[in-house]
Image (tube, rainbow, N blue to C red):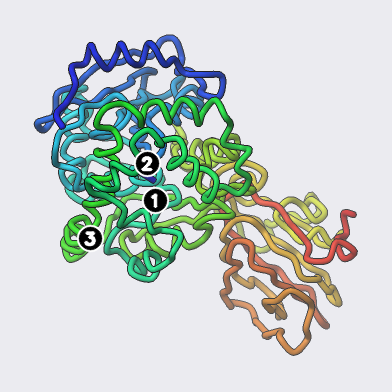
Amino acid sequence: MFIKRLLIGVMAAIAAACPALAGIEPFPAAFRTQEIATNGTTLHVRVGGSGPAVLLLHGYGESGDMWAPLAARLAASHTIIVPDLRGMGLSARPTGGYDKKTQAKDIAGVLDDLKFDRVQMVTHDIGNMVGYALAAQYPERVTRFVIIDAPLPGVGPWEEITSSHALWHFSFWGPDAERLVAGRERIYLDRFWNEFSADPKEFDESSREHYARLYAMPGAMHAGFEQFKAFDQDAIDNKAFLAKGKLKMPMLAVGGEKSFGTTMAAVMRFAADDVTSAIVPASGHWVMEENPAATIELVVGFLAKSSVGPQEIRLTPSELDFGKAASAGPGTSGVGAIQTIVLKGDPTKAGLYTILLRVPAHTRIAAHRHPDERIATVVSGTWYFGYGKSFDPVGLKALPAGSFYTEPPAEDHFAETRETAVMVQITGFGPTGTTYVEQANNPAR
């Protein structure tokens, strides 16, 4: 989440006096930094790699430094652009312009300076708000959008979300707030890192020291508070964007398992037509600190493009070779008699997959769940399916061939077949897995 500009030389001197500590991974040595004048301010920008451009936007409590591990992973095949937002990190701190519509124009100016017309975009926290404003104002410039763990002012259940007492900081700004926090920046920031993480220890001490020093720089806390102060204007602007229509580019809406979770996708479906949901397991809000490996895999999988285009597949029922099918493969309940054919993708890796299951007659599957959002179609037979934390015959609904149902992320469900075998096709966004409510029912135990 989230005065006049000091001279760049002064800022650089302070940064040199406060080098990144062990918890902050450096960007690859081939990356360069530059100060880019844009829209009446100057942004500190890191650039590296080669290929199609990927724009990474950070949020409050951090800076563009948070993205170093992801940048390192993507740089072999993409040009990575990582600015510090207006007033944050090592960027200039103007007195105004902290509404996200204005900041989106800051970013558009950076892209113009770097000669990139189109980008894929990955955002977190307040970066989400700037990213949405960029995509809404310049939809032709954003080809794919990964948006991580923070709502958008004025979009969907914004009023309900902001009524939470945990978000009091949205209204904490002004001269007296600045006086209260002056000299106590670390204490104030610790509250974010502690309360919005699944395990505060994952946001390590050296990272905390690094960011606390950045936010203790002259004017930094004022600029940070201005980000929150602008939310009312942001809500007005976002509603105006929505009135013109939803975003059309593919979007991956990612929530930390212990933070926004599937709510992230639910919110974004108010603002975008093509939304896929994903969860970073064992993580709160700070996904790049709490579970960077899972976060990176989700992002890389979604941004990946095939150089030869999509594979064309056409199969009749007689061509589905269950003789070579796996037994209860990844993405299934794990019941041994179930046969699995992977039609598309790989359920164990990040990205879209489709599997076809053949479930024998008289098979009962106890309550379990999967981490990804899945949609399913009954291809043949009658499938008896229900939601809940334990198998309940009363909760089963008969789904004949042609029926459609969903398996929301982390929602427990159960099923059975009766007199006939059933084939079910399931599509999800990996990596997937299976967790039983009662481990005693897990066939893999």
**Frontmost residue, 110 versus 39:** 39
Q: Name the residue under label 2.
A: 60
The quarter of the image holding the C terminus is bottom right
| Horizontal arrangement in the rendering, residue 161 relative to residue 224 (left or right) | right
Q: Mark 1 points at which residue?
A: 251
Q: Give residue 332's quadrant in the image.
A: bottom right
- Residue at 28 percent across and 34 percent down: it is 85
Residue 128 versus residue 219 in the image, above or below: below
Mark 3 crowdedness (10 Å alpha carbons): few <14, some 14-19, many ≥20: some
- Residue at 16 percent across and 62 percent down: it is 240
Q: How many marks on residues? A: 3
- Residue at 28 percent across and 55 percent down: it is 247
Q: Check residue 78 in the rendering and tell me which mark sits there, or answer none.
A: none
Mark 1 crowdedness (10 Å alpha carbons): few <14, some 14-19, many ≥20: many
Q: Nearer the viewer, mark 3 or mark 1?
A: 3
**Frontmost residue, 116 versus 337:** 116
**Place of residue 34 in the rendered image (x, y in percent of width and height, measured from the top left):** 26, 16
Amino acid tagged 2: Tyr
Q: Name the residue under label 3.
A: 235
Amino acid tagged 3: Ala
